[in-house]
C-alpha cells in the first residue's frame, strides 16, 4: 500500500479537479498541451497513482473509486483487514460486471465522479446546517 492516506489521495484528486477546470479551454483547443499542463500540476498523482490519474483525466472515475477510498480509510482505521476489503471489492465488481451477464440481473447503476462528489458535498452542507441550527437551540 502507498504511504499516502485515503484522505491525501482524495485531496490529490480534488487538486486535479482544480487543474482540469483551470485549463478546460485548453482541453478544447489543444488536448496534448492540456494533458501536459494537468500532469505537470499534479505530478505526484501522475507518478504515484497513474491509473487514477488516467481514469480521472479521461472522465472515467466513478462511485467505485470513492467506495474503494472508503475501504482504504476503514483499513487505515483498523476497522477491516486488507483481506476483507479485497473480498468486498471483488463482490462489488462481480455484482457490477459478472452477475448481470450470468444471471440476467440488471446492471447496478453507478454514479459518475461528478454526481458522487455533488451528493457528498450536499450531504456535508446539510450536516453543517444541522449542526449550526442545533448549536443555536442549545
Image (cartoon, rainbow, N blue to C red):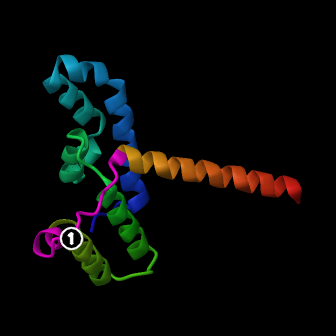
Circle 1 crowding by C-alpha within 10 Å: few under 14, some 14–19, many from 20:
few
Q: Is residue 31 above or below residue 56?
A: above
Q: Which residue is mark 1?
A: 105
Number of numbered tags placed on the structure image? 1
Q: Determine if the magenta segment contains residue 102.
A: yes
Q: Position of residue 7 (x, y in %)?
A: 43, 57
Q: Is residue 31 above or below residue 53?
A: above
Q: Nearer the viewer, residue 70 or 117?
A: 117
Q: Is residue 16 above or below residue 30?
A: below
Q: Nearer the viewer, residue 50 or 27?
A: 27
Q: Main secondary structure of the magenta part?
A: loop
Relative placement, left or right, of 64 versus 47 is right
Outermost residue toward the right in this view: 138
Q: Secondary structure at mark 1?
A: loop
For the C terminus, which image quadrant?
Answer: bottom right
The residue sitting at 31% across, 56% down in the picture is 110
The residue sitting at 27% across, 47% down in the picture is 45
Outermost residue toward the left in this view: 102
The residue sitting at 39% across, 61% down in the picture is 6
Relative placement, left or right, of 80 versus 96 is right
Outermost residue toward the top in this view: 29
The residue sitting at 41% across, 51% down in the picture is 116
Outermost residue toward the front in this view: 104
Q: Position of residue 77 (x, y in %)?
A: 46, 75
Q: Determine if the magenta segment contains residue 127.
A: no
For the N terminus, which image quadrant?
Answer: bottom left
Q: Position of residue 23 (x, y in %)?
A: 31, 24
Q: Position of residue 57 (x, y in %)?
A: 23, 39
Which residues, given as a range, are shown in magenta?
98-113
Relative placement, left or right, of 132 versus 14 is right
Amino acid at each position: 500500500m502507498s504511504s499516502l492516506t485515503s484522505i491525501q489521495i482524495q485531496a490529490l484528486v480534488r487538486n486535479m479537479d482544480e487543474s482540469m477546470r483551470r485549463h478546460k479551454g485548453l482541453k478544447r483547443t489543444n488536448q496534448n498541451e492540456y494533458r501536459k499542463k494537468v500532469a505537470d500540476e499534479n505530478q505526484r498523482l501522475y507518478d504515484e497513482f497513474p491509473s487514477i490519474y488516467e481514469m480521472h483525466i479521461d472522465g472515467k472515475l466513478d462511485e467505485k473509486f470513492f467506495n474503494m477510498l472508503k475501504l482504504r480509510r476503514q483499513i487505515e482505521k483498523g476497522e477491516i483487514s486488507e483481506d476483507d476489503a479485497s473480498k468486498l471489492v471483488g463482490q462489488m465488481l462481480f455484482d457490477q460486471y459478472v452477475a448481470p451477464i450470468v444471471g440476467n440481473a440488471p446492471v447496478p447503476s453507478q454514479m459518475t465522479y461528478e454526481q458522487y462528489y455533488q451528493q457528498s458535498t450536499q450531504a456535508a452542507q446539510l450536516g453543517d446546517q444541522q449542526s449550526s441550527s442545533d448549536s443555536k437551540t442549545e
